[in-house]
Image (tube, rainbow, N blue to C red):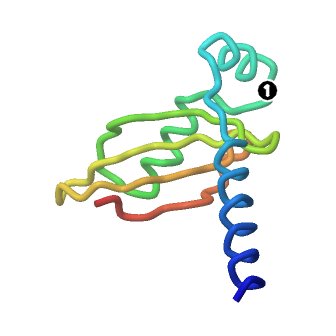
């Protein structure tokens, strides 16, 4: 039983450490990253997100750095009033997550 408890505590700590690694990118950093080509422009990233759900509207966007990788998050609402959450690599626009959001 002690082993199981230790494993659960270790797993919880690892999950918490992963959450702590994601940090928001400041507006000044966003301009610098976009200008340098480290990330795509938000216009291009928004177009990539909207290509996944044509006729949707963008509700919110966010850029985070996670383990040295910039992740662009977009919340959409489609024409059926369904919310979607999309995460993509901000450098390549590779879709990492595309799921309905309750």
Q: Residue at x 82, y 40 (%)?
A: 68
Residue 69 in which image quadrant: top right
Q: Is residue 35 left or right of residue 19?
A: right
Which residue appears farthest toward the bottom when viewing the image?
Answer: 1
Q: Is residue 4 above or below residue 89?
A: below
Nearer the observer, 8 or 51: 8
x and y percentages locating residue 65 in the rendered image = 71, 36
Residue position for label 1: 37
Q: Is residue 23 above or below residue 10?
A: above
Q: Quadrant of the N terminus?
A: bottom right
Which residue appears farthest toward the left when viewing the image?
Answer: 80
Q: Describe the element under mark 1 as helix, strand or loop.
A: loop
Residue 53 in which image quadrant: bottom left
Q: Is residue 60 above or below residue 26?
A: below
Nearer the observer, 14 or 5: 5
Q: Is residue 28 left or right of residue 83?
A: right
Q: Residue at x 52, y 30 (%)?
A: 43
x and y percentages locating residue 29 in the rendered image = 70, 16
x and y percentages locating residue 96 in the rendered image = 62, 59
Q: Residue at x 59, y 14 (%)?
A: 27
Q: Residue at x 42, y 53 (%)?
A: 85
Nearer the observer, 68 or 98: 68
Crowd class of label 1 (few under 14; some 14 to 19; many from 20; radius 10 Å): few
Which residue appears farthest toward the front when viewing the image?
Answer: 2
Q: Is residue 100 left or right of residue 3?
A: left
Q: Is residue 76 left or right of residue 18?
A: left
Q: Is residue 91 above or below residue 14?
A: above
Q: Quadrant of the C terminus?
A: bottom left
Q: How many marks?
A: 1
Nearer the observer, 62 or 50: 62
x and y percentages locating residue 84 in the rendered image = 36, 56
């Amino acid at each position: 039983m002690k082993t199981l408890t230790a494993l659960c505590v270790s797993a919880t700590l690892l999950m918490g450490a992963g959450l702590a690694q994601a940090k928001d990118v400041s507006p000044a950093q966003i301009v610098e990253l976009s200008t340098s080509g480290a990330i795509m422009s938000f216009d291009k990233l928004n177009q990539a997100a909207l290509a996944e759900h044509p006729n949707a509207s963008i509700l919110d966007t966010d850029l985070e750095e996670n383990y040295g990788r910039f992740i662009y998050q977009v919340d959409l609402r489609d024409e059926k009033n369904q919310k979607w959450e999309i995460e993509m690599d901000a450098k390549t626009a590779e879709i990492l997550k595309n799921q309905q959001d309750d």
